[in-house]
Image (spheres, rainbow, N blue to C red):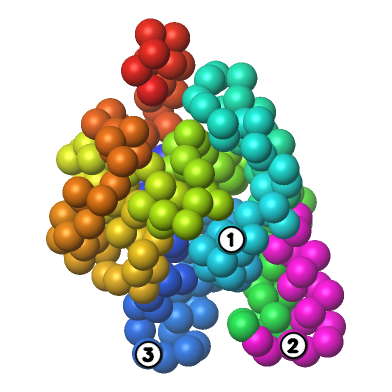
Amino acid sequence: MIYFFIGDSNYILHLHIHNPFTRNKYLNRTIDLMLASVTGMTASNWKIQHLHGHHLGKDILFNGSKDWEVEKYSPLRALSYCFRSMWYTFWRPFVISLRNGLKNKKQPINYRWALTEHLLLFALIALLLVFNTKIFLTYILPLYALTFFITRYVDYLNHYGCDETSSNVYEHSNNCLNPSFNRFTHNFGYHTAHHLKPGAHWTQLPSLYEEVADKIPDHCKKDYSWSWVLIPYHFYLSQVGKM
């Protein structure tokens, strides 16, 4: 139950970086820090690797070469992608924020704040490690690691078997049409709509999807839930040719 709320917090953080919850910069930064302390992922990490990386077709910086892994679904390909790319996702946004933050670069984001946000998270980790090593190593660190793993796994489901280089934008993403998954993740499964209009409010995604549904290839429409707890079921579906 606890991880249910932590996992949902990371989807909320994803919403927040696309559509800040308030118009007050300092209040938004407070929300950023609160969510980062819970999930282990900073808003700046999301902005660097997702907003200004994934959505601009710059995945290779944060995922490395992934052609073999995303060609089609298999347990080996999925796990390889997740365990390999989660380290890129963790370190490269920090390295970019360090390099650009020291230069005080402010576009497309304020990299000095991005660096500060990363360092504050690292400071929190150090404090937790010093003052309650057992709890940190047995509870908090595994949850942080699991958060990164899950973001990579859902990203994998979003795009495996798709041609992200195609001139047809409707072939770039898979879509999860499972109601329970979309209810929990604020309609994250309507991924084509999200890519077409990244700044659209989450409540608009179902209607935006319906507007283009007939243009999306059938193989990019999935009925099963993408919840990470169903990974064994996904492995089973892949073995019977239903992924």
Q: Nearer the viewer, mark 3 or mark 2?
A: 2
Residue 57 at x, y percent in the picture: 58, 61
Residue type (three-letter) at the residue carrying disc 3: Arg
| Picture quarter with the N terminus | top left
Upstream in sequence: badge 3 or badge 1: 3
Upstream in sequence: badge 3 or badge 2: 3
Classify mark 2: helix, strand or loop.
Answer: loop
Q: Which residue is mark 1?
A: 57
**Circle 2 crowding by C-alpha within 10 Å: few under 14, some 14–19, many from 20:** some
Q: Which residue is mark 3?
A: 23
Task: Name the main secondary structure of what is drawn in magenta.
Answer: helix
Give the magenta-colored segment's residue range: 90-107
Write the residue at 28% across / 36% down.
218
Write the residue at 18% across / 40% down.
179
User: Disc 3, disc 2: CB below 8 Å?
Assistant: no
Q: Is residue 111 left or right of residue 12?
A: right
Classify mark 1: helix, strand or loop.
Answer: loop
In this rendering, the answer to whether 38 lies above or below 174 is: below
Upstream in sequence: badge 2 or badge 1: 1
Q: CA distance from mark 3 to mark 1?
A: 28 Å
Q: Which residue is mark 2?
A: 105
Q: CA distance from mark 2 to mark 1?
A: 22 Å
Observer-nearest of 211 and 77: 211
Observer-nearest of 7 and 193: 193
Instruction: State the image quarter where residue 119 is shown.
Output: bottom right
In this rendering, the answer to whether 228 lies above or below 28 is: above
User: Does the stretch in magenta take in 97?
Assistant: yes
Residue type (three-letter) at the residue carrying disc 2: Lys
